Image: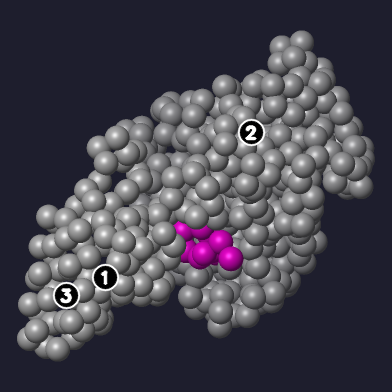
Amino acid sequence: MSLLVVGLSHRSAPVSVLERASLSADAQIKLLQDTVAAEPAAEAAVLATCNRIELYADVDKFHAGVAELSTLLAQHSGVGLDELTPYLYVHYEDRAVHHLFSVACGLDSMVVGEGQILGQIKDSLARAQELHSAGRLLNDLFQQALRVGKRAHSETGIDRAGQSLVTFGLEQLALGGDVQDWARGKKALVIGAGSMSSLAAATLARAGVSRIVIANRTADRAERLAEILNEGASESGVAARAVSMDAVPGELTRADVVVSCTGATGLVLTAEAVATAVSGRVGVDGPDAGGRATDAQPGAGGAPSLRGPGAAQAVRPAAAGAEHDGECPLDLPAMQATAGFSVLGEAAVAGMAAADLEQHAAWVDNAPRPQSSAPAAVVTGFDPAQETEAIAALAAAAATVGRIPERRRPEPVAEIPRPRPVLFLLDLAMPRDIDGAAHRLAGVRLVDIESLADASADAPMAADVDQVRRIVGDEVAAFGAAQRAAHITPTVVALRTMAADVVANEIARLDGRLPELDDKQRGEITQAVRRVVDKLLHAPTVRVKQLAAEPGGAGYADALRTLFDLDPETVAAVSRAEDSTEKNGKNRGPA
């Protein structure tokens, strides 16, 4: 077995690189064709999902295979080889098998344990079979990967470790709350009608949305998906209908939840289109969707901030004497207008001379104390005891150095509250369907592949994951043993065929020398010779199969061919015959 996989995924590359390297359906077909046409590769299959691109091949040379597969991935993805190479990973032979089996079980998924990857592996195999790029090795590998994935889901609780990307995305939209409570009664728009979009529509229906609109470039697929949803409406209570892509802008203004997953190479929803749909439904400075006014902003009404420019006007006390008409003679509001200054403490007087500090201290001594009835957030005057102590310390420092050094300290900036979202966007496409700038729009919550990758990094791992890993390890060992045993089978068959030919030739020569033998005598002699040959070959062939199944046992086939001087073409002919028989059996399907 010389299985090689070269690829990149959300674990090895940032989403921006995965987005640029994504392969369209046509690009995947061309990549397969070019791979099997390349010298090092005999078979090829492509596994391309929203968060991984992997090229599997049966190669006769490792280093040449890595170079060729990497170059082909770069050519067909449109990302330069120098830029792509740092993000590529390479697995060979048993490690490649282990990788695919782990992927099939959901261990390598963005959301651990999700089962959608099994359908994607099945589609990958079907595409390679249709293009005749999958031979015995990749057929066996991908079919076994499907069986291992199903076994992991049926024998363990890996499903509890995670969920589908769609469910995880909806949970992120709901901010970790119950998805059904969040989705109940909402109107959904699903853009796309492929496998991911279909899963999203079904998940939304189960979650309790009131209606689902399906938009797709191919009207037939959208209508078929809507029909399927309507057939199950008796259980979910959701009404579904199909529309054209031209109707998306209008449907966007009526939707509460939008899920998009298409194969488009450009944006399906721009930030401008989202802003247009949201306008009129929520105002940036108005009340949120729940009817509550947003928190007051600094300087924009309500309780003023005690920090930053403008704070002096809110906290300036009225002086006791009429000499300064209630104002500090140093005009502190002008002093503190520099960003980062405060009228309280040393920041207000940084850089002032000692004489100026004394004037300020005298003014503070006559300032009224804060009123106890005043709200906590509003300062009506200085506390003379605290302020005088601070000013005295600063004055002493000024007397020593002449001036107070300017000390600008960063002031905390209050986060501007956003109104509650009225439009929830889930972008599951790669490359993305929805402009990332939409997340900055008020009233919009956008979750995409990149944010899902960040959120999933902290997702808890279930104890069942360890059990699945043990299953993967056992299955990898069994697959490797079966492949190594299968590798020597043509050689064993060729050996037995050669022995049968030797027996037939010797019986024919015996007939020429002893023509008087009757049929019974000739049959007895023939059987005796065959039994001798079978007994001589039985132990070596059984043992060599056992040895070949062990790691490093591939050389036993070469040893047999050398010891018995077997014709390599005879062995190859047996292999071709077995491949043809196996392929015909698969084409006939189950009995």
Magenta span covers which residues?
A: 7-16
Please name the residue shown 74% across and 32% down the image: 188
Local SS, label 1: helix
- Mark 1 is on which residue type? Ala
Regarding residue 479, the answer to whether it shows in the image is no
Pick the quarter of the image with the C terminus.
top right
Q: CA distance from mark 3 to mark 1?
A: 16 Å
Please name the residue shown 32% across and 55% down the image: 318
Local SS, label 2: loop
Tell me if mark 1 has few (under 14), some (14-19) or many (20+) residues whose alpha carbon lies within 10 angstroms of its own: some
| Residue under numbered circle 2 | 289
- Mark 3 is on which residue type? Glu
Please name the residue shown 85% across and 44% down the image: 248
Local SS, label 3: helix
| Residue under numbered circle 3 | 358
User: What number is the disc on residue 392?
Assistant: none
User: What number is the disc on residue 347?
Assistant: 1
Residue 125 among magenta residues: no
